[in-house]
Amino acid sequence: MVRGEKREVDFLKIGIYAFLFLASLPIFLGFLWLFIGSVSKSLTYGIIPEGLSLRNWRFLWKIPYPGYPDVWLTLLNTLFLAFGVMIIVVAVSTMAGYVISRMKFPGRSFLLASTLILHAFPAITLLIGLYYVLRVLNLLDSVMGVILAKAGLFIPFAIWIMKGFFDGVSWDMEMSALIDGASRFQVFRKIMLPMVGPGIAGISIFAFITGWSEFIFVITFIRKPSAWTLTSYVNSIIGDFRFVDFGLLAAISLFYVIPVLLFFIFTQKYLMQITVGGLKGGR
């Protein structure tokens, strides 16, 4: 009986791994096609490489076409956008999540409901309003304008996540520190923040990826090539589909994906500690 149960569990695992493999196969083949296309002179029928060449990677040491910015400047703009969104989201959502979780004040329920409603709005419906706001603030053609817009739309979601983590922390630890003479800020900094570390790591990762992959706000609010991000760079290469340099597009796409892929590989252990609305294992 035990052997039969063990065999059944093994078959279940095999089925799960087979499903995961089949589900990830198109993604793997897509990256393989990008790599082959980026180091090939041309692709016959779109899949068969003809000769190897690094010409498609020329954007790393020279500007591929007139009017394009230096790709390293574009990379710095993209990093500034991703880290800017991450820093603002983490700073605001941790403080707001703590206040909403631990303190009772008039309008608390309304504030919670309003943050949820704000997150439900699709970003594209707010483009016109955000455009006029950024124009008044003189933040058009500026990466900082995109950072503020993107962070503002992501913060409500992050607040709900952080509130769930703070709710999962026992009141006893906080009350003991307050009785011992610690200030509210000391409790927040020395006790609460370490306890919700997985939540902070999670929203940091999501906010970074959100900023890194932002496209709609970038092409809407930024026209100046010197303020382009990598999404603008890739979009400009696509241009007219009749004249696309597919080799250059494949190389640029890989260059765009590799940093965030490495970032995710090194931070995925923190994501494994997260469940919806609290700490892994519960409290």
Image (cartoon, rainbow, N blue to C red):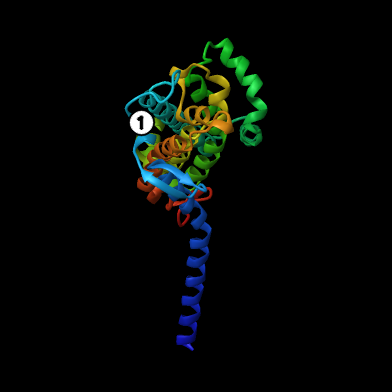
Circle 1 residue: 58
Q: Is residue 29 left or right of residue 57?
A: right
Q: Residue furthest bottom?
A: 1
Question: Is residue 107 at all visible to an observer of this figure?
Answer: no
Q: Which one is nearer the viewer's eye here, 276 or 19? A: 19
Q: Position of residue 278 (x, y in %)?
A: 49, 49
Q: Position of residue 184 (x, y in %)?
A: 41, 32
Q: How many marks do you count on the picture? A: 1
> Which residue is rendered at x = 46% and y = 76% of the image?
10
> Which residue is rendered at x = 46% and y = 18% of the image?
225
Disc 1 packing (10 Å; few <14; some 14–19; many ≥20):
few
> Which residue is rendered at x = 38% and y = 51% of the image?
269
For residue 31, above or below residue 136: below
For residue 273, above or below residue 61: below
Disc 1 marks a residue whose amino acid type is Arg
Q: Which one is nearer the viewer's eye here, 279 or 16? A: 16
Q: Name the secondary structure under disc 1.
A: helix
Q: Position of residue 124 (x, y in %)?
A: 64, 29
Q: Which one is nearer the viewer's eye here, 183 or 276? A: 276
Question: Is residue 54 at all visible to an observer of this figure?
Answer: yes
Q: Position of residue 272 (x, y in %)?
A: 43, 53
Q: Which one is nearer the viewer's eye here, 17 or 98? A: 17
For residue 13, above or below residue 193: below
Q: Residue furthest left?
A: 61
